[in-house]
Image (spheres, grey):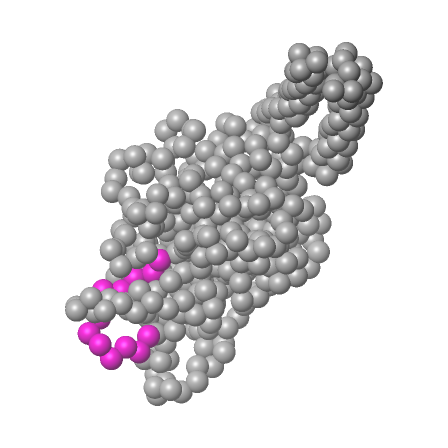
Amino acid sequence: MDDCKNNEGYTRRNFLLAGARGAAGMALVLFGGGVALVSANTVSAGGSGPRGEYGYDPTKHRWIYLVDISKCIGCGSCVRACELENQVPANFFRTWVERYHVSRTGQVWIDSPNGARDGFDPAVLGADVAKSFFVPKLCNHCTNTPCVQLCPVGASFISPDGVVLVDEQRCIGCSYCVQACPYGSRFIHPETHTASKCTLCYHRITRGHRTACVQNCPTGARRLGDAKVLGDEVANIIATSEVHLLKPELHTEPNCYYIGHSQEVR
Amino acid sequence: MENTKHIWRAVILLLVLLVAMVLGRQALIPESFGEMGFYRADALDEFMAKEMEYGPPGSCTECHDDVAEAKAAGGHAGVQCEVCHAPLSTHVRDGDIVAEMAINRTWHLCAYCHQQLTARPAGMTQIDLHEHLELGSGEAIPEDACFDCHDAEGIHSP
């Protein structure tokens, strides 16, 4: 009872009131901090508008890519051009060409010696080949891409014009994205130890030129389009003809379309 | 109410932590991060700044208009010069000639496109090199095989 006497000024009511005041104060501090953080994260107006030396506005373009399998002759010019344009390390590929041989019974042989960098040699196959064709491949620049979703540091991203890029300065080389890409478009660069991939020749397309692979394709099997340009030829072909996507069942929403596609191509 | 000092201590501690977090965050997160999304917006400018190796179409015509004219009339009209030669940057940089343009004078260059392969589209001009050169199967093809008969003029405008 003596103890109670000593604490006479401090009733249950007082204790609860003090607690409530403290809680309100903390809530205020946390709320203020939260507001500060959110405002720091808000997309600023600096995001849009022309950028860089050539005044390129990424919000005014939407890049799309079209591959016509029936036109590809498997010369590998695209692979060599990509290597020289982008200093791709030996034995790694940002684009490559596969050769398919399909027998009458549905057996499929696929080869891509050195990514078709040195072209193809005549194939010696014992079986009866019903059809054969070349398939150029590259990053599909997916809209719903798994590689960007799981990048833990914000190094992989989709630019406003739809190009999937890797910020070398941010990349920690964890290679989650390399494993996540269902198309095998990424690799870890042997020198920088960061993820590397097709940039859709971002330095070329932002200057108004075509990618190295498209420009160097002798038959027009590879084409680059801009879906935000009214009357764009490639966009028209994609809109009006039968085009296919690679692995559509994965719902990655690729921006790389194929014409003359055969069901064996994955 | 001397006991409220515990609460004040907690409040001050929280404030210190908050300030440390905000400052730490500012130091760790790059300047342009978040401007356009969950990435460094400056990375876009860095990609754009990269030098081009292959020149824009028509670069070669500026000096070699005679070859370009002949080529435009022939079967190789749709093939960019740099496909068979080399990127423009190996020859011209900033308007100055830095080195001679490379010319690949081996049959491998022609074979990239014209070696007979079953997977090539039917309309493509294809040559069985051994048959064409009357070589036995397995016999090595001489490196300059094509160029004995096909000169630059014929190659530019077949």
Q: Nearer the viewer, residue A151 or A111?
A: A151
Is residue B87 visible from the viewing direction of this image? Answer: no
Q: Classify the position of the C terminus of chain A by image quarter.
A: bottom left
Quadrant for residue B44, please give it: top right
Residue A149 spot, x, y in % from top left: 49, 42
Which residue is outermost to the front? Answer: A1
Q: Nearer the viewer, residue B18 or A16?
A: A16
Residue A257 spot, x, y in % from top left: 35, 45
Position above or below: A5 against A74? above
- Residue at image position (63%, 58%) is A193
Is residue A184 visible from the viewing direction of this image? Answer: yes
| Left or right side of A120 for B95 | right
Q: Classify the position of the N terminus of chain A by image quarter.
A: top right
Q: Nearer the viewer, residue A257 or B85?
A: A257
Q: Is residue B7 magenta?
A: no
Quadrant for residue B134, please give it: bottom left
Q: Is residue A131 magenta?
A: yes
Position above or below: A15 against B97? above
- Residue at image position (50%, 73%) is B106
Magenta part of the chain? A123-135
- Residue at image position (66%, 61%) is A191
Q: How many marks?
A: 0
Which residue is outermost to the right? Answer: B2
Residue B104 spot, x, y in % from top left: 54, 67
- Residue at image position (33%, 67%) is A110
Which residue is outermost to the left? Answer: A105
Quadrant for residue B32, please give it: top right
Residue B19 spot, x, y in % from top left: 77, 28
| Left or right side of B77 for A194 | right
